[in-house]
Structures are given as C-alpha cells and as structure tokens.
Image: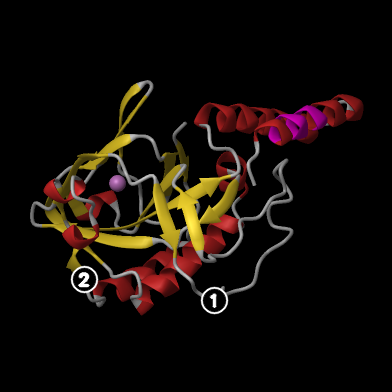
Amino acid sequence: MLITIPDLLSAEHVQRCRQALASADWTNGNRTAGHVAAHVKANRQLTLDDPIGRQIGDLIVQALRQHPVFQSAALPAHILPPRFNRYEGGEHYGFHIDNAVFRLPARPRTGPAHADDASRSQSGLQAEGPSSGLLRTDISTTVFFSDPSEYEGGELIIQDTYGEQRVKLPAGQAVVYPGTSLHRVTPVTQGVRYGSFFWTQSLVRDDTQRSILLQQDIAIQRLIQSGGDPDTISQLTGVYHNLLRLWAEP
Ligand code: NI
C-alpha cells in the first residue's frame, strides 16, 4: 500500500525548514549506508545528532501524530527520528531495500503529546516518542522539502505489487510505503532536492493487514459522515477492533 499525505506541513513550515536546511552541515551520505547500499548511494545527509535535523524531525513527527490519515494507514507503534538528505549535481541512490531493524537513539522526548489528535481514526492510537530499543522498519516515509519545479530528476521510484510507482511530490507532502519495497532515487540533474526519510514500526507488521484495516476505517468514517445506521456503525467498529486485536503486536 502506497499512500500520499498532501497536507503534512504548512507552506510556512516548509519555508522555515528550507532556510534551515540550506545552511545545515551536510556530510557524505555513503557513511550511513550498509555494505551493499554504499555501492549505490551518492548523496549528502545530516548526521543523526545534527541540531537542525532534530528540530525539523520533531516538527515532522508532531505533524504525523496529528494526521488522521497517517495514523489510520500506519498504525504507528514507534517512529524513528527523521533523517535528511540532499541531492544535486547528478547525485542519486540506486535500487535497494532499507535495513530491517534500527536501534532507537536514547533521547529525551521533546514536545507535547497530542492524546486526542487521532480520535477521528478507529484505532485512536498514538505513537510513543523515541526511547532506547530496537525498531522494525515496517513502513518508510519520505517528506519532500523541494518543489518539483526546483529540480530535474530526483524521482523516488518504488516497486510494489502493481509495478513501478514514480513519486515526486510538492514540498510539504509525504509518501508512505511498505519498508519491504525495492526503491531508488533517480539522479538530480538540475537544482537541489531536499528531503526527509524515516521509518515507522507499525502495530501491524503485515502491509496487507494494514491495508484491510485502513479500508475498514475509511468505510466506517464514510458511514458516520453520511448519517448511517448507528447499530451497523457500532458493529463494523467492533469488527475493526477485533481484527486489530488479532493482528496487533504492541
Ligand atoms: Ni532507502
């Protein structure tokens, strides 16, 4: 399941992030690639402890916590702190699959939690802030910080069940796709492409099961909005929770 989130960050936030990213201290992205990926990776990244990266990362995670579509689709248990990359002058990242497991950095949680923000989705669940431990990368997310008009190339190509998806979204928008996917970024031949990428461990590890839950959630929301029969809505909501109970691995 590949979904796009068109309204993750406001234009004002994007502008502020872009100014900060332009002055950030970029290092060779090859250093963070695994042995195999290092052969195909040519871009620049912020180090994991970069203060600008941390600040923007917190903003992204906060926006995701408040976003009902991300909550419904990802059913997040843990979100890794977002990372940042920059491609220009022909830089690219060839086909690869991301590492399956990452260690969460030990780091105090910043910013308030929003306990009621996901109330529109059926699960009503909130991802916890980063704590130490291991995280399984069930879901990948890329947030675009450059508009397509600002650079040539730099498309995120994702192979999924239905073939190749080419993704190049306006600044402030995000794409969410299964961590199991083979993917690449085509060379940026003109301009600069700024982006953020990170992984989420979901309560539901399997993409097909997450997709079924999302469809059920969307159908229930539509029934509620169209004033459907309350008993039917209650019954379908119960089915949603029983499926989630069956599949969730908190
Ligand atoms: Ni990747």
Q: Earlier in the sequence, mark 2 or mark 1?
A: 2
Q: Name the residue under label 1.
A: 108
Give how far across and how far down residue 78 sits, in percent.
55, 55
Give how far across and how far down residue 218 sits, in percent.
66, 32
- 224, 195: nearer the viewer: 195
What mark, if any, has residue 26 been given in the picture? 2
Residue 130: say if magenta.
Answer: no
- 112, 227: nearer the viewer: 112
Q: What residue type is labelled 2?
A: Trp
In the image, the segment drawn in magenta is 238-244
Horizontally, residue 161 falls left or right of residue 36, namely right
Q: Quick one: label 2, few (<14), some, or many (20+) residues within 10 Å? A: some
Horizontally, residue 164 falls left or right of residue 135, namely left
Residue 218, relative to residue 82: is it above or below? Answer: above
Give how far across and how far down residue 64 sits, in percent.
54, 56
At a point 37% along the width and 20% down the height, the residue shown is 162
